[in-house]
Image (cartoon, rainbow, N blue to C red):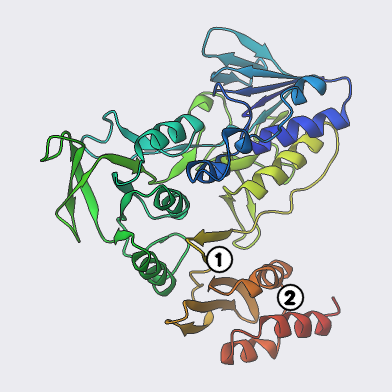
């Protein structure tokens, strides 16, 4: 059996290792389009903050790891996939046949359509090459503008602060982390950052980028909103990512935001599976398909896809939309339908001066979503209560009265339901 895996991130690496444990005699090819050892993008902020060396981003630290498992690494870009003939067409002209194919090519960074944003000296922070470029210019005292205060932007922000730059964060939305936090939590995070020396400008849209700036160096960003213009020596773009599926055009695979899969993580074409950031599978908290682009989900889907590719029948139970963010020491989380549901109830408690906040969302007597800020003691219990879909009964009213009684509600409701 010949297995081909497109993508050498966490999903692809775990899949390759799982396949080898399941099929000692199979041929396994792991294709990645970057000239790097397999690495974790989530470790890049720690590299920028100089907390780790480049080797600390590597998923496997033994340089002979894949060779020892007889897994063939290829550093090439895939141009297209021909599912009709079972071939992967490579950008340099070669091709590879497969019996089973795993799509694990992850996400790619995207830029908003802004004039001048494609100039040299403007960088994403998505690859090791990006990190090297940023590190070269993000020196003490440098004027840095970070575009985007979403999940990725907030992680990068702390790394830039630790490098001693003069940092301004520009966010189109009316709060920080708008796809993860409500108004209360997002604006508390903003205030937390401002108190720690970061100039945060929400409700601000960059209209164009000009080079050089008024002083003959760097860039001038013309803006609309809270500020008219900004000067920068370095611009870092963190305005989002999308599944990397362009090479699948014409493949016959069903796609939406990502690649659509069934409960075994098989695509619409037999023998072709998907995992990681491009896998659009079942989200049990919404009952719909969604892309769950977090590293734990990538690892789990990579493992389960590989088991099914090698002959097992293991269903993927579905992901839970969940994010945990550390913003300069302030921990925030969001779960499931944190934005609420039509006809549902909610409960919240706020300690603004102490930067502590909790918001719970209910559908009938089920907890379906939550946000916390500065309250790490509830992280695991909230996830368990939402995932278990246990009926709260009388505990719903008690949580409406005091949303901090999460542990008591979990213990009381699970015992009541015989769990």
Q: Is residue 176 above or below residue 120?
A: below
In this orientation, which residue lies closer to the viewer: 100 or 385? 385
Image quarter for residue 215?
Answer: top left
Image quarter where the N terminus lies is top right
Residue 53, image x and y in percent?
58, 36
Q: Are marks 1 and 2 in contact (CB under 8 Å)?
A: no
Residue 243 vs 153, above or below: the answer is above
Cα distance, mark 1 to mark 2?
A: 21 Å
Of labels 1 and 2, earlier in sequence is 1
- Judged left or right of residue 215, residue 205 is right
Provide residue 39's location: percent of width, then percent of height: 61, 34
Q: Secondary structure at mark 2?
A: loop
Q: Is residue 366 above or below residue 241?
A: below
Residue wearing tag 1: 333
User: Which of 295/264 is in front?
Assistant: 295
Residue 41 at what x, y percent from top left? 55, 40
Between marks 1 and 2 in the image, the one whose residue lies nearer the viewer: 1
Q: Residue at (40%, 48%) from the top-left corner?
A: 160
Residue at position x 24%, y 57% from top?
Answer: 204
Q: Which mark is residue 390?
A: 2
The answer to whether 123 appears left or right of 58 in the picture is: left
Instruction: Tell me, for residue 263, which label it has, or none.
Output: none
Q: Is residue 84 visible?
A: no
- Residue that appears at 34% across and 36% down: 137
Q: What residue appears at the point 61 percent right and 29 percent down from the top-left corner?
A: 7
Instruction: Give the structural element (helix, strand or loop) at label 1.
Output: strand
How would you rate the neighbour count of disc 2 (Cα within 10 Å): few for under 14, some for 14-19, many for 20 or more? some
- Residue 13: where, in percent of width, then height? 70, 33
Depth order, front residue of 251/403: 403
Image quarter where the C terminus lies is bottom right
């Amino acid at each position: 059996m010949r297995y081909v895996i497109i993508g050498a991130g966490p999903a692809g690496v775990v899949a390759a290792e799982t396949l080898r444990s399941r099929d000692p005699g199979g041929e396994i090819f792991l294709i990645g389009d970057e000239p790097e050892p397999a690495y974790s993008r989530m470790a890049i902020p720690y590299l920028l903050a100089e907390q780790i060396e480049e080797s600390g981003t590597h998923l496997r630290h033994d340089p002979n790891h894949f060779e020892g498992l007889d897994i063939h690494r290829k550093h090439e870009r895939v141009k297209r996939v021909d599912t009709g003939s079972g071939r992967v067409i490579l950008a340099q002209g070669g091709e590879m046949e497969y019996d089973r194919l795993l799509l694990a090519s992850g996400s790619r960074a995207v830029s908003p359509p802004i004039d001048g944003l494609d100039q040299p000296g403007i960088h994403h922070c998505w690859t090791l090459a990006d990190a090297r470029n940023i590190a070269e210019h993000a020196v003490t005292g440098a004027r840095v503008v970070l575009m985007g205060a979403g999940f990725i932007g907030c992680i990068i922000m702390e790394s830039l602060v630790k490098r001693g730059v003069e940092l301004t964060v520009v966010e189109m939305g009316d709060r920080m982390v708008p796809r993860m936090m409500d108004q209360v939590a997002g604006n508390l995070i903003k205030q937390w950052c401002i108190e720690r020396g970061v100039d945060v400008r929400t409700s601000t849209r960059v209209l164009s980028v000009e080079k050089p700036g008024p002083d003959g160096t760097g860039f001038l960003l013309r803006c609309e909103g809270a500020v008219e213009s900004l000067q920068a020596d370095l611009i870092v773009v963190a305005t989002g990512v999308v599944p990397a599926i362009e090479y699948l055009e014409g493949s016959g695979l069903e796609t939406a935001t990502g690649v659509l899969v069934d409960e075994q993580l098989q695509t619409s074409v037999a023998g072709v599976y998907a995992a990681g950031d491009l896998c659009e599978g079942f989200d049990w908290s919404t009952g719909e398909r969604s892309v769950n682009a977090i590293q734990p989900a990538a690892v789990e889907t990579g493992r389960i896809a590989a088991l099914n590719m090698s002959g097992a029948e293991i269903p993927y139970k579905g992901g839970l939309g969940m994010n945990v963010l550390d913003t300069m020491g302030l921990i925030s989380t969001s779960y499931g339908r944190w934005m609420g549901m039509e006809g549902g109830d909610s409960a919240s408690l706020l300690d603004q001066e102490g930067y502590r906040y909790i918001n719970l969302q209910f559908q009938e007597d089920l907890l379906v979503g939550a946000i916390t800020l500065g309250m790490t003691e509830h992280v695991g219990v909230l996830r368990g209560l939402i995932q278990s879909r246990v009926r709260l009964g009388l505990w719903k009213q008690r949580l409406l009265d005091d949303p901090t009684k999460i542990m008591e509600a979990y213990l009381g409701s699970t015992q009541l339901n015989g769990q």
